[in-house]
Amino acid sequence: MTDGTGSAARGRDTARPLSLAVAARGVFDLALQGMVWSRRSLLMAILLGLPAAVSILYRVVPKAWVPSRLGGPDLYALIAVFYYVRNFLPLAALFYATALIADEVEGRTLPYLLTRPIPRSAILLGKFAAYLTTTLTLTLPATVVTFFLLLTARGFAGLGASVPDLFRDMGVMVLALLAYGALFTLLGVLLRRPVIPGLLFLFAWELIANLPGYLPRFTITVWLRSLMTHHPAEEGLAGLFAQTLPAGMCLGVLAALIAGFLGLSLWIFSTREYVLEQ
Amino acid sequence: MSVAPLEFVRASRWYGPVIALNDVTVEIPPGVTGLLGPNGAGKSTFLKLAAGQLSPSQGEVRLLGVPAWGSPAVFHRVGFCPEVDAFWEGLTGLEFLMILLRLTGFDERECRERAEKALQEVALLDAKDRKIGGYSKGMRQRVKLAQSIAHEPELLFLDEPVSGMDPVNRRRVIDLVKRMGREGRTVVVSSHILHEVEAMTRRVLLIHNGRILAEGDVREIRDLMDEHPHTVALRARDPRSLAEAVVRLPHVLSLSFGPEGEWVTVQTAKPDEFYGAVSGAAIEAGVSEMYSPDEDLESVFKYLVAR
Amino acid sequence: MPIYEQTYRRYEAREPLRAVRFWPITREALRIILARRAFLALLAGSWIPFIVRVVQIYVVTRFPEAGRILPVDGRLFGEFLNQQIVFTLLLSIFGGAGLIANDLRTGAILVYLSRPLTRRDYVLGKLGVLLALNLSVTLVPGLLLYALALALAPELFLKWSLAWIGPAVVLHSAVVSLSVGLLSLAVSSLSRSARVAGLGFAGLFLGLEVVRGILAQGFGLRPVALLSLRADLRALGAALFGVAERGPSLPWSWPAAVLLAVSLLCLVILRSRVRAVEIVS
């Protein structure tokens, strides 16, 4: 099969790198395999699937035992807003997205990918797509189960009218994973130790969303909150100064943030040298 | 005019104040070239620049006529076997090769064919469905080599390719490298194990302190090193009469006897003339063995590095 | 004999050194961590609440009316130490996440355990690092604050009725540092990546807090407060210093029991994970 020059196999254009889509798809398959069958994903599956378990508990435990509990729809709203969009989806994004390139650098497997005829940006895009697929697979089914269990706690009346809210909530969750994922991908590409800055962003900077005026617009959470249909009662500053911004503006800003962060990440990764320790 | 497979043109690379590679100009021709140097000499930097993982701080590095950095298309025709023992441990040997072949542009069927062929070359076909995490050190080294050759590249960089291998597989790899050189491919082998590089090729590139010390055939390099007389060892039935004949030759600088009295070790400034002149005396003294202990790579290397 | 044999001679460590053979592990790890500027910045930042509290004490001594808005009594120390829990978490993530994870990844654990060190010495050495870091932001500023309070406001603090403050600061700091340290070390031993361990530790602490909040609001049950380790530590601080905490209060023995159970679980995890040999099935 060898002809002394190692010439191209049938149908392969060796004058150009693989197309971005084909290359990203190859990296996606590789990354997905690594993400799905990992301890990290098992932990995430437990954390992101916990609301479903709480919903089962809610349905199984008689109301008489816990008379002070919230109604099903209110509990669902709490879970959708506080559990998923405000806390666990950003944490999941931090968990996965900061590691997209760092895993390859730490594992010293990056040279295998960098010495393939593929655009560098395909590596990051493929891994980002794998992150998104993994987190959505873990989140959306749990959200649907939680929704149906809690909203049918008092029967099926009004369920049909609430289903659009479910789709809207899932849409916001997708946007949350995209926006935080893009930001933390950028942090992961820029910084050697992105975990602390990521945590400070999530649990310090994002608190600015609770302030009055224009300052909240410099957070991601205020745009996501505005898109949610549910607004559970909050204490403190968040309760006093909560803002709801126009949906069109929210979508536009989020799209710009996602494109901006991701674009910058791709550019930095494409031009950066990685000197791995031997 | 054909393009050199690998070309460094006044290439330098520094990391802050440290110059790792200093104004290197070299063309690597087709065939096998051994890249040698002590630790910290700049071999790894040379290979990383050649494999397009780093860009030169100054000058150019060209792979098959195109800049090595920022030209992903060239990796259709280039293979790289890194030194580090690192894999996606959850993949089997076959999966590992197939994924990388997919990223080189082959379709599914061809990926499988090429992967199995490459695994066959490195004697890993039986273990193709085992996870790499369960491979021995030698098997890991072989699967790493397999991924670098599976797409039949024209140009191959091998960083310590036989590290951790048993003698049988080491021999197999050396034979594979020599065969690829005979086929006209360009293979650059970096190694610390000098006698193994010698077994693969006579052509070497010696690096020290970021600069090229010497390049070319080992013997030619040795011949040019006038300040180090050549050592020739002769084993004879009558070493004393041999010594008496040899000491009279004009270019013999010194002479000594081996500990058991059978060997005579001669230092000469002109080895070719010595070989011609000593033949008669050698027959009379019953010389049964003759060799030059410092024409090997290690001696050349030591002499050059010590300069 | 005039010419001595230059052969190997066995060296036996002197008896007292055996008790502190974990110390080089702690010392070297601290030396590496403290060489990082970002870490020193974090450490410096964690002393800002201390400065704020000193200013508070000074202001109240100068303007006693201010004491109505900013009360200065034994509870001040409880509130201060409860606030410092966040910094122990950050320091444990930054300095502690990779303590065992990196050794497992690089195989350095084999090097440690091939020395005359037991697994207990190894764990003690690593725990010593976390204790040193956490105590530097709890015990040290806590006692310093008490000393400054005695110096700046003797009329407020130099009383027998408030003599419990010092021991309470020591006890609360020790409990916080030990619990957080053990948990950080256990999580570090569960991964070969410092980054994953750090995130896992943060996720555990913060995640349980969120879960507690959801369950508390959703079900209105008091015992769910025990789910959050941070809430348990704060509850202990509240009980020690008489601080009023928001939300339902539980007897201090419950959070104490939870913390003890978690610490024991961490020790079990460390015992199973800190090994020279890993059996791969």
Image (cartoon, rainbow, N blue to C red):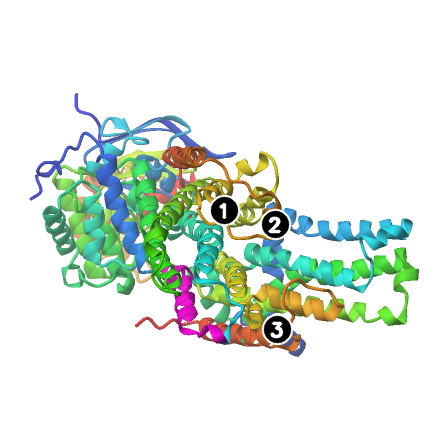
Q: Residues within 10 Å of mark 2 (few under 14, many from 20)?
A: some
Residue C204 at x, y percent in the picture: 50, 62
Q: Residues within 10 Å of mark 1 (few under 14, many from 20)?
A: many
Labelled disc at residue C240: none
C271 to C40, vertically: above or below:
below
**Residue, disc 3:** C255
Query: Residue at point 88% right, 51% down?
Result: C65
Disc 3 is placed on an element classified as helix
Q: Is residue C98 magenta?
A: no
Disc 2 is placed on an element classified as helix
B113 to A246, vertically: above or below:
below
**Residue, disc 2:** C39
Which residues are drawn in magenta?
A: A39-64
**Residue, disc 1:** A194
Q: Residue furthest right?
A: C155
Q: Nearer the viewer, mark 3 or mark 2?
A: 3
**Tag 1 subunit:** A
